[in-house]
Image (cartoon, rainbow, N blue to C red):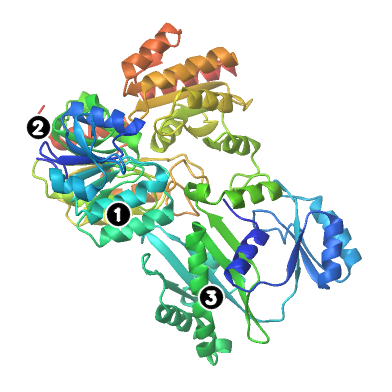
């Protein structure tokens, strides 16, 4: 089992004909993702990478019964693409676009909140259910099937953790990169709740970073008898206050959003903290014990 | 992008929010002419940082001659790293009371928050800490905007706390409705992450006037506001209060790179903010001191990598560079090509340690090996290697 996506998930790619859209659609297909359609306004009726292209998401859904949108369009069009996916009542939309204006995202988030669509991203690597399906661009070869759930703000650290786990023999159920923007779709807390309900997931790795209070919010959930062990990692421990470390959301302002406050909140909630990725992998092994299913 | 006071005020005025009469002056002569026209004025340095008053960047003058002398003095100043390029000459107000009215991003609620307070003229974060009861907040629905009844609720909640205003709260609330709606629309149309009037002055005759303004535009939306960025470039060197006084960060911004300058000697480059943050943590854990944070972002091509290396090495404190790449949307071969190109074209002789894994890692590693650069696999080991290599140099 897994969360959010599996081998049967039917994916429509918004922006399929772009340079990045084409490259990553091919990678997704190579991994086994069932890409059923593409959407590019003005290109309806054509075929790209072996799938039909439509002018609108609504048409793609009617024709192909797509259920998950992969949104890989330039920043000025990203929020609109998210709202189009929500309007077409897709259960899941994954937006990887980096640099979406925050006011656009505030509006898109309000539309998502009033819809049945779950959003992942923007500014994220997407998600991957090991051995079955990926939506986004988590590298194909690092993951292997198993029983560890992964959720991370940073894309590249998502890959680091997956690779470390795989090399140590701990496969994954689903890995979700939620993204580093201040206004986004699913949060740590939302994804942890999904992992709590997934029978196959026996432990969860959570990779946070400085800025905001989403890690503290997740700690609040973990403290309430969260049914599975959580191993956490926080990057940006040595980041100076007041400097924005790349992600729009990664900034320590005053004494809010520090790595230490997140580590303290998670520790007192019952999660264990790894100081390095290697540490995280070792701690997962300890928590899984004989159940790791190597 | 932080706008200057005069830019913010011009935006307010254009939207219909009253501001005091004022003129922009880029020379002492222009300031003199402004004072001749306006009478008694405050001459205010236009810099994108706070604390200019304490630094001596504001002077109240009675005559055009004084305006000329003071403007000449202020225009020769450098405030927290910002050379003063212009002054705003503005008439004073007959102040009865000062309010605070602002809009900012509330990331916990994933929407904008409108804040109104009867305690104007002070740092709102301090008011929030010391007198939280003086602050009223509203989180408007992003699709509908703030409705008049909501703004009245906000106004009554804030104004009833102030004894001097309690008796005219009704009139003030009525006047605040259009002002707050205008300010909200302005914030949205300018993609502002902060849009603040502090103080919002109530004059002796009962008018509401924006006596000072702060406007910060979302960097991701700068493409929609090129006119403001161009204007800003004329009047201020850098445009980010946190980084403007650092010449390396100004240069990085010019080159379009996501770069933060730090105090150490190990240059750090990576793809992805989280990865670079972790790279700095690893360098520090290995006993080294990071010289910078540089994220080449997702999908970077060879020329971006070359540009990044050139940028990091322009800091003379850098003794060697650690390049940490975990390819997702970024492809190993593209990065490798950029590294090799940079090394050959820029004649880099300082140590380079490259850790490369992820999408097209084999192609990338192969290219590096052929060029005589040994690629690493583990980030922890690579961090130790670069720290060791840069220690030897010292």
Question: Label 1: which residue?
Answer: A83
Cα distance, mark 1 to mark 2? Answer: 45 Å
With respect to residue B154, does A28 lie above or below? above
Question: Label 3: which residue?
Answer: B179
**How crowded is the residue under tag 1: few (<14 C-alpha within 10 Å), some, or many (20+)?**
many
**How crowded is the residue under tag 3: few (<14 C-alpha within 10 Å), some, or many (20+)?**
many
Element at label 3: helix
Can you tell which quarter of the image residue A66 is in? top left
Q: Nearer the viewer, mark 1 or mark 3?
A: 1
x and y percentages locating residue A170 in the rendered image: 17, 30
Residue, x 85% and y 64% (percent of image)? B33
Q: Quadrant of the C terminus of chain A?
A: top left
- Which chain is disc 3 placed on? B
Cα distance, mark 1 to mark 3? Answer: 30 Å
Nearer-the-camera pick, A135 or B315 = A135
- Which chain is disc 1 placed on? A
- Tally the numbered discs: 3
Can you tell which quarter of the image residue B113 is in? bottom left
């Amino acid at each position: 089992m897994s969360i959010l996506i599996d081998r049967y998930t039917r994916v429509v790619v918004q922006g399929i004909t772009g340079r990045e859209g084409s490259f990553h659609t091919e990678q997704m297909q190579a991994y086994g993702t069932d890409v059923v359609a593409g959407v590019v306004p003005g290109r309806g009726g054509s075929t790209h990478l072996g799938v039909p292209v439509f002018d609108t998401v609504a048409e793609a859904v009617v024709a192909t019964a797509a259920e998950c949108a992969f949104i890989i369009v330039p920043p000025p069009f990203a929020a609109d693409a998210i709202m189009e996916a929500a309007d077409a009542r897709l259960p899941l939309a994954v937006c990887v676009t980096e640099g979406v204006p925050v006011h656009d995202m505030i509006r898109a988030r309000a539309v998502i909140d009033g819809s049945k669509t779950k959003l992942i991203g923007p500014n994220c690597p997407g998600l991957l259910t090991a051995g079955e399906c990926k939506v986004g661009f988590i590298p194909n070869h690092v993951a292997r099937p198993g029983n560890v759930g992964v959720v991370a703000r940073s894309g590249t650290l998502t890959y680091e953790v997956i690779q470390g786990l795989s090399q140590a023999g701990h496969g994954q159920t689903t890995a979700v990169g939620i993204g580093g923007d201040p206004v986004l779709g699913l949060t740590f807390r939302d994804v942890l709740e999904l992992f709590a309900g997934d029978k196959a997931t026996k432990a969860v790795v959570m990779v946070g970073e400085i800025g905001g209070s989403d890690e503290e919010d997740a700690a609040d959930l973990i403290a309430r008898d969260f049914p599975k062990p959580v191993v956490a990692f926080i990057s940006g421990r040595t980041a100076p206050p007041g400097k924005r470390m790349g992600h729009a959301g990664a900034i320590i302002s005053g004494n809010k959003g520090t790595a230490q406050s997140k580590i303290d909140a998670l520790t007192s909630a019952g999660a264990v903290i790894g100081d390095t990725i290697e540490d995280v992998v070792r701690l997962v092994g300890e928590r899984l014990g004989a159940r790791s299913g190597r | 992008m932080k706008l200057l006071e005069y830019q913010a005020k011009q935006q307010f005025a254009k939207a219909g929010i009253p501001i005091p009469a004022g003129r922009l002056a880029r020379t002492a002569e222009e300031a003199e002419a402004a004072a001749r026209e306006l009478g008694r004025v405050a001459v205010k340095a236009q810099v994108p940082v706070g604390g200019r008053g304490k630094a001596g960047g504001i002077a109240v003058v009675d005559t055009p001659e004084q305006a000329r002398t003071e403007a000449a003095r202020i225009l020769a100043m450098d405030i927290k790293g910002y050379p003063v390029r212009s002054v705003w000459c503005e008439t004073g107000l007959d102040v009865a009371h000062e309010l605070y009215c602002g809009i900012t991003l509330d990331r916990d609620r994933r929407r904008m928050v409108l804040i109104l307070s009867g305690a104007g003229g002070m740092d709102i974060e301090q008011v929030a800490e010391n007198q939280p009861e003086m602050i009223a907040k509203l989180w408007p629905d992003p699709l509908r905007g703030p409705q008049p009844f909501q703004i009245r609720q906000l106004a009554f909640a804030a104004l009833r706390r102030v004894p001097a205003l309690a008796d005219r709260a009704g009139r003030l609330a009525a006047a605040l409705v259009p002002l707050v709606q205008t300010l909200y629309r302005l914030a949205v149309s300018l993609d502002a992450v902060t849009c603040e009037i502090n103080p919002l002055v109530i004059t002796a005759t009962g008018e509401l006037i924006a006596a000072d303004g702060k406007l910060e535009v979302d960097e991701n939306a700068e493409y929609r506001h090129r006119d403001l960025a161009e204007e800003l470039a004329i009047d201020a060197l850098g445009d980010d209060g946190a980084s403007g006084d650092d010449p390396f960060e100004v240069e990085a911004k010019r080159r379009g790179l996501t770069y933060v300058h730090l105090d150490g000697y190990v240059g750090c480059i990576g793809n992805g903010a989280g990865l670079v943050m972790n790279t700095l943590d690893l360098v520090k854990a290995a006993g080294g001191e990071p010289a910078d944070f540089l994220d080449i972002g997702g999908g970077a091509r060879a020329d971006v990598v070359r540009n990044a290396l050139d940028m990091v090495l322009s800091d003379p404190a850098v003794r060697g560079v650690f390049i940490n790449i975990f390819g997702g949307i970024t492809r190993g071969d593209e990065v490798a090509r950029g590294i090799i190109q940079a090394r050959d074209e820029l004649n880099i002789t300082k140590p380079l340690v490259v850790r490369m894994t992820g999408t097209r890692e084999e192609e990338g590693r192969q290219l590096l090996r052929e060029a005589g650069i040994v690629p690493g696999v583990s980030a922890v080991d690579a961090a130790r290697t670069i720290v060791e290599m840069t220690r030897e140099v010292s």
